[in-house]
Amino acid sequence: MPQLIELILEKIWKFLISLKLAVVVIVSLAASMATATVIESIHDTATAQYYVYRALWFYLLLATLGLNILAVALSRLPWKKRHAAFLMAHAGILMILIGSYLTATLGLDGSLKLAEGEVSSAVELDQHVLLFKQGESTQSFPFPWIPASVAHDFKPMDFPQFKVRIEKVISDADPKISFIPGTDASLKPSPAVQVKILGSPMGGAPEFWLWSGDPGWASQKLGPVRFLVRSENQKDLKLGDNEGVSEARFDLVAMNNGKLRYEATSIRGEKKSGEIDLSRLKSKDDPMIIKPGWRMPIQVQVKSFVDHAVNQTEYVTAKEKPAGMGSALPVPAIRISLISNPASKLWLGLGDRADFKDSDGTNISVGYFPKRMVLPYAMRLKTFEIKNDPGTQNPAAYSSFVQVVDQFQKGEAELSNLPVTHITMNEPMTVKGYTFYQASYIPDSPRPVTTILSVNYDPGRALKYWGSLLLITGAIALFLSKAIQKKKSPATKEVSL
């Protein structure tokens, strides 16, 4: 029996140090990474990570490479001076593999959003969680992202302790917002109107909703014309100090009696108004088209009207990304419902939350959020700076001026005296092991004031850097030692003769 075990161990050892194993592993790694590159170019980074870079089989392949490298190095025992270059190269590979493992298991990648003057330490990670709250009980569950091919076969997932079911998952979703009649009598009347613009100076036939329930939806500017919706009780809709000047207006007014009127005002102040025939909204033969009477050849088609409207958000599969956009992060969405009431289904996009009331009166809150972690300090955005290409609105460069804030610095005077660090796309900032890169920003008018910083913590970085240095040094030393041996070998032969 001991001889059998010894024989098995000997065969395993010979297999681990064999050149055949090294060739198979290296070719497999090359094929895997080539496949991942193709997947990333067709889909996105997250899909490539799911199928290759973060897959268990890929980790096992890397572990096999590490075992092969370690076994080959140990097979040269006892080591001699001539093994130095060989050992340096192999030690470098092992350090890179160990550093990569530490990065994958202990490191983090996330983003930090900051508006000018804001102080925050909450970093959003690229991991997702479901957050449930029922009474005094709050619990979170990891809910990893899955690619479209897996989401297509997703089977409903129940959380019986919170009476909630996950019915469907869309791995990359676009929101689809519609407006339906509100059934809650306590809601404030919020009319919604769907319009289509014909003869637009911007070209095409834009179609959009206007809804008075949200200031962001109440008006829409299209070229020199602003379209608005309001109720009869709102005599005028205030648009701000600089708006409503040198622009035409087209107001859609929901009357208290359920009817709908329009009020068109030209740039010169000429007015035209009338009642909209609601019976023609759905007509294909005689659609409700209004001619405001302006010099511009604009006509307005009213397609839908909901007097007491509430917004309803659904999600559909996102349109295919243009070429070159494969690395963009997908935005997932889930459809949930109460287990006891399938009709209660609604959609949650990443970052959304919803409230349910069960048949027994229990209030249940469900959130779908990126996982968050708190930095050991806070960051404050002092100023966001953007520079455009001359004569255009295309950003040429953007950067952030930030301050590092600890928990004891809260007063405005203290904050203003803190040192300021300039973070650009090519000049990151590192504080206590966390590196901050300028990643993006949130567009705004007249200028962006919210920055998005990429946050990286990599405990394996030093090992990977030193390992790379050892590998390169060892490879150069191996090459030079072989060249020197070749030069010496003829002289050695002559002496022996």
Image (cartoon, rainbow, N blue to C red):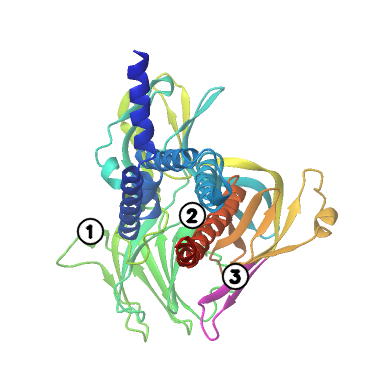
Does 198 sit left or right of 388 as displayed?
left
Question: What is the distance, in whole Å, between disc 1 and disc 3 at their CAs?
Answer: 52 Å
Query: Residue at the spot x=47%, y=60% of the render?
Result: 496
Residue 387 placed where, x, y %?
A: 60, 76
Residue annotated with mark 1: 279
- Report the quarter where the N terminus lies: top left
Q: Quadrant of residue 54?
A: top left
Residue type indicated by callout 3:
Tyr
Q: Earlier in the sequence, mark 2 or mark 1?
A: 2
Asked whether the viewer can see residue 165, the reply is no
Bounds of the magenta span?
A: 384-399
Characterize the magenta stretch by its predominant secondary structure. strand
Mark 2 or mark 1, which is nearer to you? Answer: 2
Residue annotated with mark 3: 398
Q: Earlier in the sequence, mark 1 or mark 3?
A: 1
Question: What is the distance, in whole Å, between disc 2 and disc 3 at their CAs?
Answer: 31 Å
Q: Earlier in the sequence, mark 2 or mark 3?
A: 2
